[in-house]
Image (spheres, rainbow, N blue to C red):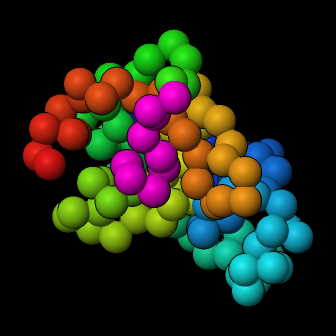
Amino acid sequence: MSPTEQEFIFIVNSTPGLCEYGIGSEGFFKSTGVNFMGSKKLLLKGYREFLICYVWLEKKCLPEQTVSWNAPTSRALQEFAKKTSYVSNGAMIAAIISRHIPYTLIAASPNVSVAISRDSSCFSSR
């Protein structure tokens, strides 16, 4: 069963630094010219994008226990998932959090490294 819109809103609001652009500190986003609060508001309107990512992760990706040194990033997964419809990096990260897939923050980046097996079917289309 897919998460409700209320569950999505809870994830977004309870994850510090999460916005449509990705995840990071307000200072990081300010230094890159991103209006953090505006981007967070846009993400909160992205429930449909979140569901696309959630279902895509469920069908195409094999989660692992830990994030490996060559783990894919949220941006790479976003690129695969948005082949049929646009999805933001923040929506992908919210879906990763919702599916309880381990991830690590990447310094000075809005992306995260994700514990997804490189043997997942999402990578077979490369």
Instruction: Report the residue at 81% width, 79% height from top.
Output: 31
Q: Is residue 67 above or below residue 104?
A: above
Q: Residue furthest left?
A: 125
Q: Nearer the viewer, residue 47 or 31?
A: 31
Q: Which residues are magenta?
A: 69-77
Q: Is residue 105 above or below residue 42?
A: above
Q: Is residue 24 above or below residue 126?
A: below
Q: Position of residue 84 (x, y in %)?
A: 20, 64
Q: Quadrant of residue 39?
A: bottom right
Instruction: Report the residue at 80% width, 68% height from top.
Output: 28
- 94 relative to 36 in the view: left or right: left
* Residue 82, magenta (yes or no): no
Q: Position of residue 7 (x, y in %)?
A: 62, 42
Instruction: Report the residue at 27% width, 54% height from top.
Output: 80
Residue 59 in view (yes/no): no
Q: Quadrant of residue 48?
A: bottom left
Instruction: Report the residue at 82% width, 79% height from top.
Output: 30
Marker count (numbered):
0
